[in-house]
Amino acid sequence: MNNKKVILKKVEEIVDSSRDKTLGEVQAIKHIGIDEENSTVVLLIEVGKKINEVTSLITRSIAKVVKIEYGYQSLVIDYEQARPENFAKKAKIIAIASGKGGVGKSSVTANLAYAMTALGKKVGIIDADIYGANMPKILEIEKLELNGTEAGKVYPYLVDGIEMVSTEFFVEENKALMWRGPMLGKVLKIFFEDTLWSQDLEYLLIDLPPGTGDVMMDVNNFVPDAKIVLVTTPHPSASHIAIKAGFAAKDLKQDIIGVIENMSFYEVGEEKHHIFGEGGGALVADKLLVPLLAQIPIGQPTGPKKSIYLETEYIGIMYLNLARKLMKLV
């Protein structure tokens, strides 16, 4: 008898209470393996919500099958949370964070998106900096309007091959956003659950708000597999707060993959002027035990978009190299 096939069939009949469907219906069993020598069954299962109320019920049900019915001594289950239904299933997600505002986090996000696109990748951006959303301005989008469906879903805005959503599309021009906590979750639901992203999207960049607040925690609930990149300047005040933000992300079990030091220096000829000091990026990276991925100097793009470097420019080439590093890391 092939125990693996029989156990798989029985496990597929178990219900995921967070989706009200059996594991078989949603093809939730991503891996099953049996180590006969050590009498161990190993499973990787995708659940709608990776919370104890859900996983403990599934674990108990599987244990009855594996241990009581088939006599195996050990059971090892890893759970991963499923992405929202309309969300890009295969996209690698990179969330760009910072400790404080004004470090160029949004411009770094935008330039990374263009660099990845130049490398032949299909890229999207979520402008999750709810109160300080300015991605449409950086990308020089004039018509702040999204198309939608009768079912209440929206299509991301397409600019230069990059898909993008932002709260700027939902408020009047030049009006401040005055939303409290519950509304923040609702707008994030639009981005993650009600936006019809292309299913062949390869990379999704999330421009997080500075600091550690509701949005960072809510984003983690929607996409706990997102990788975090921290942006800081060399200045001690920026790096000090970036370290705090990094440890907060670690407390949320988020995977920080590196640090970007922006506005590192201003170059005149062969001489570098460290306007905001030196060493901030390296300090953050050392404290968080992650690599310093790049030191981006102060500059001014010469192309048609005032905030986006051409891939032939000195800083544009830096972004191409940074994009390659990030794609390897994720």
Image (cartoon, grey):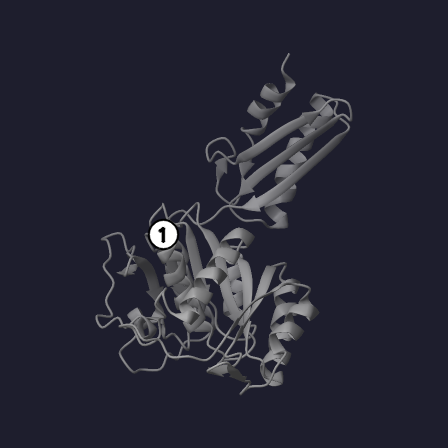
The image quarter in which residue 170 lies: bottom left
Would residue 320 be visible to someone looking at this image? Answer: yes
- Identify the residue at horizontal 52%, vertical 83% (top origin): 271
Inspect the image, locate mark 1, and give the three-letter code of the amino acid beneath it.
Lys
Nearer to the camera, 15 or 35 = 35
Q: Is residue 147 left or right of residue 164?
A: left
Q: Give coordinates of residue 194: x percent, y percent.
A: 35, 55
Q: What x and y, as percent, mark residue 30?
A: 55, 35
Considering the image in quadrants, where does the N terminus appear? top right
Camera-nearest residue between 117 and 253: 117
Q: Does residue 129 appear anywhere in the picture?
A: no
What residue is pinned by disc 1? Answer: 122
* Rendered location of residue 176, percent (x, y): 35, 82
Seen at 29% across and 57% down, the residue is 161
Pick whichever, 221 or 201, lies toward us.
201
Q: Residue at x 29, y 73 (%)?
A: 305
Across and down, in percent, residue 35 comes to 72, 26
Viewer-proximal residue among 271 and 214? 271
Q: Is residue 113 left or right of residue 149?
A: right
Q: Secondary structure at mark 1?
A: loop
The 10 Å Cα crowd at callout 1, few under 14, some 14 to 19, many 20 or more, is many
Using residue 136 as the reference point, say whether residue 98 is left or right of it.
right
Task: Write the residue at 43% across / 65% down.
Answer: 317
